Image (cartoon, grey):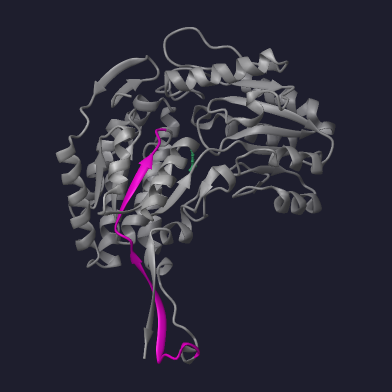
Amino acid sequence: MAIATINPTTGVTEREFDPHTDAEIDKRIAHAHAAYRSMRATSYADRADWMRAAADILESELDEAARMLTTEMGKTIAQARAEVLKSAKAMRFYADNAEEFLTGRDLADPSAVNASAAYTRYEPLGVVLAIMPWNYPLWQVIRFAAPALMAGNAGLLKHASNVPQAALYLDTLFERGGFPTGAFRSLLIPARAVEAVLRDRRVAAATLTGSEPAGRSVASIAGSEVKHVVLELGGSDPFIVMPSADIDGAVATAVTSRTVNNGQACINAKRFIVHRDVYDEFVGKFTAAMAALRVGDPMDDATDVGPLATASGRDDIVELVEDALAKGAVATTGGAVTEGAGWFYPPTVLSGITPEMRLYAEEAFGPVASVYRVDSAAEAVEIANDTTFGLSSAVWTRDEDEEAYLVRSIDAGAVFINGMSISYPELPFGGIKDSGVGRELSVEGIREFCNLKSVWKA
Ligand SMILES: O=CCCCC(=O)O
């Protein structure tokens, strides 16, 4: 895939970029490695000042950065602005909290280990390679980079090939804030060049957000090099609606949760599992609300849903929906590609999904909702868990016993009660099963890329 900005609203290639040469890649790894060595000698206070300054720069460039995101991957301009602001917020969160999160502990009774003193300390690991996707071109990178740099690591970014301007923007952002040159560098490289970088002795660890095959490949290379990885992969999150729920609230939230980011987020709700007592009401209102969304130019503030980011991503959605329809699913709205320029796909609601359909098992990375009718909370859990994924989930109920049952029974990295899955800097984020390993954000996220050193003194 060429490294290029191809505007998904028009399908027009706006800019192409030459990949970095082998010599340039080597230079950038060397920069990052040297920066890591100098970062080790800096204080949390220094790094926090630089991080806050970088956050201020990002925020001061809000409109320009948001337009860049919308141009490169098609999210609505309002959501692009929100992404920029969320990124700046996470940078400040780690500037404020990194030192506390990385405070080690003293052993209360060092004599238990025959020592006069014993304690732990968190130290940086080194250069961390981040392989990141196009769907949140700034946020996905910042949620790795802010904690990793605050811990004293250096970062190398291999960004998705369709968001090169975002990659280049990030290449300088931290240095502009005051971090040493090389503390964070972007590599403009194709996917096939990742292996050599990951195997380089100067690279200590990797984090990947992206597809399951990409995650498996990076994990196996890192495993053979005995390097730590964090993986945040796909999801097919359930959204369960029980009879006691606030149905209007559930419908409004379901629409947002399925269509935010044009339906291209790992934590979009994708499977709507509804109790039969409220099924007709929920599906009727949900279908009407999905059909009423405004699909169009993502630069227009009035637009709810923009285009899909790539032609191939839209082809994938078309194939998934056609497969389901051919096997008996029913589209209560949408279900056919929109004619015209750009990679638009209409908000779609499909019922009558069966295990024979690809949609039952595969992630729909676009604004396509599958709805299921169930007779009980136990059946809802059975369908919710009948997936290889386990990222997040949402449950709608006002019955406390049912809530407790659903929270403990769903196999996922998170459960949101009467709300939708969202990531927050303060809450750990990550999945189980094929949705990934490790956690990002919060205290757990910053500790992923640290050496927890035990110190023992005679
Ligand atoms: O694809 C993953 C999307 C994560 C979105 C978020 O962090 O809110």
Q: Is residue 130 magenta?
A: yes
The x and y percentages for residue 243 are: 81, 38
Q: Count the marks: how many?
A: 0
The x and y percentages for residue 197 are: 28, 44
Q: Quadrant of residue 154?
A: bottom left
Q: Nearer the viewer, residue 171 or 448?
A: 448
Examine the rendered structure and indicate whether residue 455 appears above or below residue 361. Answer: below
Whether residue 200 is visible here, answered yes or no, is yes
Q: Quadrant of the C terminus?
A: bottom left
Whether residue 86 is visible here, answered yes or no, is no
Question: Is 139 on the left-hand or right-hand side of 26?
Answer: right
Q: Quadrant of residue 419?
A: top right
Q: Is residue 290 magenta?
A: no
Q: Residue at x 57, y 38 (%)?
A: 235
Question: Is 109 on the left-hand or right-hand side of 378?
Answer: left
Q: Nearer the viewer, residue 225 or 27?
A: 225
The x and y percentages for residue 391 are: 58, 44
Q: Residue furthest top?
A: 339
